[in-house]
Amino acid sequence: MSSRARALLVCTALVLAVLVTAALAPLPYSVAYPGITANVLGDDKGKPVITISGADTRATSGQLRMTSITATGPDASVHLPDIVTAWFRTDEAVMPRQSVYPVGNNTEEIAEHNAEQMKQSQDSATRAALGQLHKSPKDVKVTLSLADVGGPSAGLMFALGIIDKLDGDGAGHDLTGGRTVAGTGTIDAGGAVGAVGGVPLKTQAAHRDGATVFLVPRQECTDARAELPQSMRLIPVTTLGSAVDALKALRTGGAVPTC
């Protein structure tokens, strides 16, 4: 074998070794998928998601579904082939692990953080909803219960669920108009709706579970349109009040915002 051929063989072996190492090396990413949805007007594991005391509540029809994503765990190894596969699928997304798990180094720490965020989100949703209806938290007690879900992204749907159970559209009708409405968005006590991430996967989860309308934070309209299922109507919102107004208009045939 000539020296040139030997050099080429060595170089080829080195390149192959680098490619194999790259393929097998764990990378700092998570792969996300459409997660569960839950009707906040209904029950979860045999318990009402929303329980209200201190005020009369109303029977509701239709559904208000919070949405979520599922991602590979913080301890899972994600490799180059996993990422390449996810890039070519519409029902998977590659996300920096730090954006999925910004706090905590293990499953227990992350679960604790997500549970605390969910609690804060529920408190803010309650205050926002009661504020929208000019009711005092001192007079009306709201308990929210949703198992196996963490983080703040259900805040908007919790707040809408509270309003629907207490007041509907204010004229004797359901906010949902009898539809299955899904959505996502953080909420603060003043009713401002914030971005959450993972919206294209959430619209797919909502479509899978029967939703025909999806409420999305306005700043995430572009992301939401990226993989929007056919026949799903996308409604941008900026505040709890704008979400309520949009649902009222949808029921009555009025002007509804679009992305």
Image: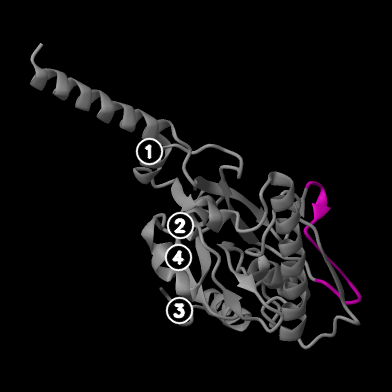
Q: Earlier in the sequence, mark 4 or mark 2?
A: 2
Q: Are marks 3 and 4 in contact (CB under 8 Å)?
A: no
Q: Residues within 10 Å of mark 1 (few under 14, many from 20)?
A: few
Q: Earlier in the sequence, mark 3 or mark 4?
A: 4
Q: Residues within 10 Å of mark 3 (few under 14, many from 20)?
A: some
Residue in the image at 77% along x and 81% along y:
130
Comparing 109 with 238, the one in front is: 109
Residue position marked by numbered label 4 in the rendering = 233
Residue position marked by numbered label 3 in the rendering = 257
Residue type pointed to by label 2: Pro
Residue position marked by numbered label 2 in the rendering = 200
Q: Is residue 55 magenta?
A: yes
Quarter in which the C terminus is drawn: bottom left
Whole-percent x, y for residue 101 in the image = 60, 54
Residue position marked by numbered label 1 in the rendering = 85
Magenta-tinted stretch: 45-57
Q: Earlier in the sequence, mark 2 or mark 1?
A: 1
Residue in the image at 15% along x and 18% along y:
6
Up-down relation of residue 256 to residue 122 (above or below): below
Whole-percent x, y for residue 146 in the image = 75, 55
Q: Are marks 2 and 3 in contact (CB under 8 Å)?
A: no
